[in-house]
Image (spheres, rainbow, N blue to C red):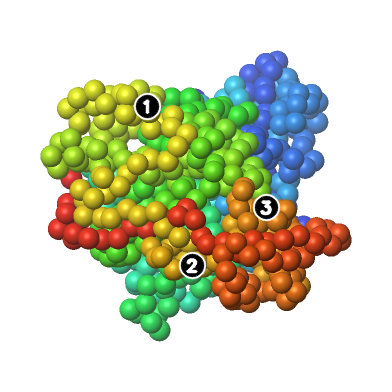
Amino acid sequence: MSTIEYRITPENLNSHLFRVDIKADLTPNQTYTLSLPAWLPGSYMIRDFAKNIIDLAIRDEKDLPVSFTRVDKQTWRFIAPTAKVTISYQVYAFDLSVRTAYLDSQRGFFNGSSTFLSIAELASQPCQVMIELGGNDHWQVATGLTRDENTSLYSAGLYHATDYQHLIDCPVAIGDFDVTEFDVNGIPHYLVFTSEHFGDRQRMVRDISKLCQHHIELFGEAPFSEYWFITHLQAVGFGGLEHKNSTVLQAGRFDLPNPQYPEELSESYKTFLSLCSHEYFHAWNVCRLKPREFIPYDLSQEVYTEQLWAFEGITSYYDDFSLQRAGIISIEEYLAILSKGATRVYRGPGEYKQSIVESSFYAWTKFYQQGPDAANNIVSYYTKGALFALWLDFTIREMSSGQKSLDDLMRAMWQKFGRAEQGTTTQDYLEEFNKLCGQDMSEAFYERLNAKAPYQLSDQFAKFGVRFSRAKFDKLNSLDTAVTNDIKPYIGAMFQQLPEGLKITSVIEHSPAANAGLAVNDVLIAVAGRKVNETSLAKLLSHHPVGKRLSCYYFRDDLLIESELVVSDSPLAGVKLTLENSDLARAWFELN
Ligand SMILES: [Zn+2]
């Protein structure tokens, strides 16, 4: 089989343009189809990457233009006039997300799904990519693509992929990097930051190594020979996308651990570690162990699956859970994180309207294109999927008298379906679950998968030494919870503080804010005749008895609306998990 030769060059930094050339050996007079994906694995939304393709041209061996037809927004067809053709175009690259491509005078980044056209008829042929720096000779290269024997680590030059799917699963970053190398089980890992930072490298390597070690131990093997953590730092940022031997992350520059405070474990650093843990877990769970519907991926249109609860929910369960197992956070700190996650699920009416199976299926629209009604009308296959994973874990541990756990289920699924990338069905999970429980659990399993109601988890938590309480919201505009008889002022809306007032970002239906007519994007300016900010609103409400009706004013666009806000105590809409018996809890955290 001949190799398809790609070449990519940063052509114009200030216009954010890459130049791409593709050379391929073809059969003369045969028809070929060029296309670019409409979405990329791990991010379930149609993104139409082809909209950034500019000035597409095809030339034959004599450098004469070859005509082609436009088939649809992302597909072109041509008849090969000669055995060799060159396909050339530019790609506009100015999206800071981890999903597409970016180029400016500081750095470049691209996913192959945004830059490399596939030749459909040759999609299984090996590819090579010549990565050029366009004169920015001091720049380095970070990618999970296979280096040619003449290409040294971090260098521009020739890289290889076994086929088109492999090519687009290896994003590439170029620029002046901060790189730290470390080994886990003898496997080289690269921690790359694509711009300056002030974080404590040694500490990050120490903590991330422990998480990697945990995941490799859980699955029993590492399915890659090297792994890249590539992080874009911004003033404020959060995001990640998983690949088979790399991940691209987005974080805030000051989310990293401060070397001046080596004992401090900030919330933002915990979140960064949790993100690293999450994406690394995906190297097994979803990059290889994946729904049958994804084999092979049809990247031209939506691919529906009811199983995202398994791939995002179980991964979300393990991302923070492994922080505790790795000794980075205490059981109490883990329970605080889990309380917050559970509160997101239990607080809104959304979980009465959608199951996690439906949430998975409608990921393309309802989850990825969330409107301001999300808390009221949908449930997340991430957060509620993680609670389903917790139920699986508790149940297997109980039914097997502590001999087995969700770890065993994941290892079995990996060995049976993941290693050979065979694809799973929901039934496959049930069968492994039944085996580990020693009896038919199908009723309880499907009841929870299809539930449009909160899970009852308090008895199971109690068996592992943890008290599950429904709790009040501790403050306005926060998911922190408290178990208390004190009055906790509550309006049922989240907001952003602006100089002119409080801009509403979400409203829970039937809440005091909803009853006052407040909607997303309204700006609440006054309550009881007083201008409000976050602090003064909380104080004002706390100085009035529950049930008192207070006048309020808010702007909707340029219209001033007068209404009434009823002083209310927080409902028990949140969750608080409290450690009561450490010995029982420790049994839950042991790696089986
Ligand atoms: Zn994920």
Residue type at mark 1? Tyr
Q: Are marks 3 and 2 in contact (CB under 8 Å)?
A: no
Residue 441 is situated, as x and y percent measured from the top left of the image, at: 27, 26
Q: Residues within 10 Å of mark 2 (few under 14, many from 20)?
A: some
Q: Which residue is mark 1?
A: 446
Residue type at mark 2? Ile
Element at label 3: helix
Pointer 1 or 2: first along the chain: 1
Element at label 2: loop
Residue 481 occupies which quadrant of the picture? Answer: bottom left
Q: Label 3 vs label 2: CA separation?
A: 20 Å
Q: Which residue is mark 2?
A: 487
Residue 473 is situated, as x and y percent measured from the top left of the image, at: 48, 62
Q: Which residue is mark 3?
A: 515
Residue 415 occupies which quadrant of the picture? Answer: top left
Identity of the residue drawn at 41% across and 58% down: 471
Confirm whether residue 8 shows in the render: no
Pointer 3 or 1: first along the chain: 1
Is 349 or 417 nearer to us in this picture?
Answer: 349
Q: Quadrant of the C terminus?
A: top left
Within 8 Å: ligand 1 and the Cβ of disc 2? no
